[in-house]
Image: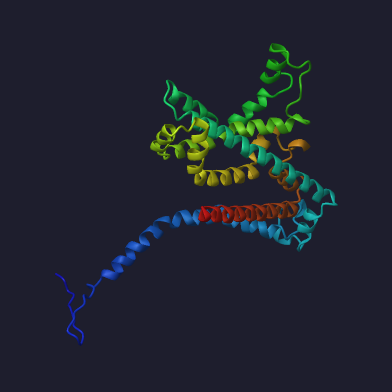
Amino acid sequence: MVTSTTPRDGAGRGWPVRAAGLIPVRLRRIGLPYLLILPAIVLELLIHLVPMLIGIWMSFLRLTQFFIANWSAAPSAGLANYRVALDVNTAVGGSLLRSFLLTVVFTALAVGLSWLLGAAAAVLMQGSFRGRGLLRALFLVPYALPVYAGVITWSFLLQRDTGLVNHLLVDQFGLVDERPFWLIGDNSFVSLLVVYVWRIWPFAFLVLMAGLQNVPEDLHEAAAIDGAGWWRRLGSITMPLLRPINQVLVLVLFLWTFNDFNTPYVLFGKSAPEQADLISIHIYQSSFVTWNFGSGSAMSVLLLLFLLAVTAVYLVATSRRRDHA
């Protein structure tokens, strides 16, 4: 039974009054989604936020192997760890700068090649032909494989004496006279780039292929009737409509590549060659090889600040470009 009444004001007009208990029910409905995601929020804080705060705290300590058993006894370092990491005239700062610049070059090449291969494959897979489904599945195999399984397989393939790559280059095709080293020296950067692009480009292919499904086919048909060729339709219709997806994809690839640790660690082990010393493996060596966790934590915080700054600038630039368009 409805318990509400309809009181009247001085003019005789009435307005409805909510039934008793309606507001608490609505509040419960509004709060239920937040209650359901509360466990996920707590786990997210425990897994990501708490270790990040501990790492920031460690960056202000002289935390070496002498204080591993009792972190609270480690003396305060203030900003000394940051000053050493940013001083390019010292051995620590100079090596960190070289690793940072190497990572920038590696990231630019890896993201560019991954996007290019993914876009080319996604565009070519839009047409109907026999075996398209099988080919799509094969393209996704490197991304579906566990990282360790895929990279360890590459490490066997790139061995100097027993690897399949040198067997094909030297024994089968005779392209080179001597067996080159692929996991040390100058070739280590090329090997790392090839392995990483092989592993990550299917993600770009998957995202772009999904985005192409939303491109109206009527636009291509109308452009073809007007005389636009395949390349003209690609540049004037397909790529502009994929711009929002490309903006997100490039940012994700950039963050993944700059932070990637698994690929160089599995491929080279704890001590990567100088030519493939990415900043992630460099920070690991500074922390767990030299046992200077304070210095390694300071480098990690600097890396975090750099990535946050680049992400903020990128998002602002793409947002302004989108608003202008």
| Residue extending farthest right | 89
Closer to the camera in the image, 243 or 170 = 243
Q: Is residue 66 above or below residue 188?
A: below
Question: In this orientation, does residue 12 appear?
Answer: yes
Residue at image x 79%, y 60%? 80
Q: Is residue 302 above or below residue 136?
A: below
Residue 14 lies left or right of residue 263; in this view the side is left
Residue at image x 62%, y 59%? 53
Quarter containing the N terminus: bottom left
| Residue extending farthest front | 226
Residue 320 lies left or right of residue 276; in this view the side is left
Q: Where does the image place residue 177, in percent across and percent down from the top left?
A: 78, 15
Closer to the camera in the image, 286 or 178 = 178
Residue at image x 70%, y 35%? 269
Q: Where does the image place residue 282, in percent across and percent down from the top left?
A: 73, 44
Q: Is residue 49 above or below residue 275?
A: below
Q: Where does the image place residue 136, in percent across and percent down from the top left?
A: 47, 28
Q: Where does the image place residue 308, in percent across and percent down from the top left?
A: 62, 55
Question: In this orientation, does residue 146 appear?
Answer: no
Quadrant of the rendered structure where residue 212 is? top left
Closer to the camera in the image, 216 or 294 = 216
| Residue extending farthest bottom | 10
Residue 305 lies left or right of residue 324; in this view the side is right
| Residue extending farthest left | 1
Q: Is residue 166 above or below residue 44?
A: above
